[in-house]
Image (cartoon, grey):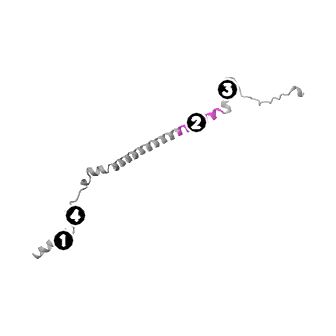
Amino acid sequence: MLQEEVIETYQEEPAEASPAPAQEPKKEWRLRINYKMLVQNMPYIGFLSVLALIYIANSHLAEKKIRRINQLGKEIKELKWEYINVKSELMFRSKMSEVSKSVEQLGLKQLSSPPQKIILTKENEK
């Protein structure tokens, strides 16, 4: 009998030491989300939603600009190669031998003798 009393006293002491948790039921996280809290935090939720939309739009615009930059880079490379090609073709066609070949059809010939200088004198100086 004495042992039973000791066990009962031992069991009662922890209950008396913390009566607050025993009296209040433990709330689950689902019970904490209710309509009142949702309405009170609506401006904050709206702000976060707008911020998320701005973030998504910003990332889409950045990706669009990156694609445009890559496209323009490819176009610049193509134009550079075209410029180099046209420049080399012009240098080839402006060589003396190529010019003489192209003007033979018009009846012009390349000079075989060097050009001569013509000097004009005035009649008063004689």
The total of numbered circles placed on residues is 4
Question: Which is the main secondary structure of the residues drawn in magenta?
Answer: helix
Q: Earlier in the sequence, mark 1 or mark 2?
A: 1
Location of mark 4 (residue): 21
Location of mark 2 (residue): 85
Say whether residue 122 is left or right of residue 25: right
Location of mark 3 (residue): 103
Residue range (magenta): 76-94
Q: Could you say which quadrant of the image residue 17 lies in?
A: bottom left
| Distance of label 3 from label 2 (alpha carbons) | 24 Å
112 and 6: which one is in front?
6
Task: Please tell me whether residue 93 belongs to the stretch shown in magenta.
Answer: yes
Q: Residue at x 27, y 51 (%)?
A: 36
Looking at the picture, which amino acid does disc 2 mark?
A: Asn
Rendering coords of residue 5 (x, y %): 12, 74
Looking at the picture, which amino acid does disc 3 mark?
A: Val
Q: Earlier in the sequence, mark 3 or mark 1?
A: 1
Q: Residue at x 67, y 30 (%)?
A: 99
Q: Residue at x 47, y 40 (%)?
A: 68
Rendering coords of residue 116 (x, y %): 79, 30
Foreground: disc 4 or disc 2: 4
Rendering coords of residue 61 (x, y %): 44, 43
Q: Are marks 3 and 1 in contact (CB under 8 Å)?
A: no
Pick the quarter of the image with the N terminus. bottom left
Location of mark 1 (residue): 13
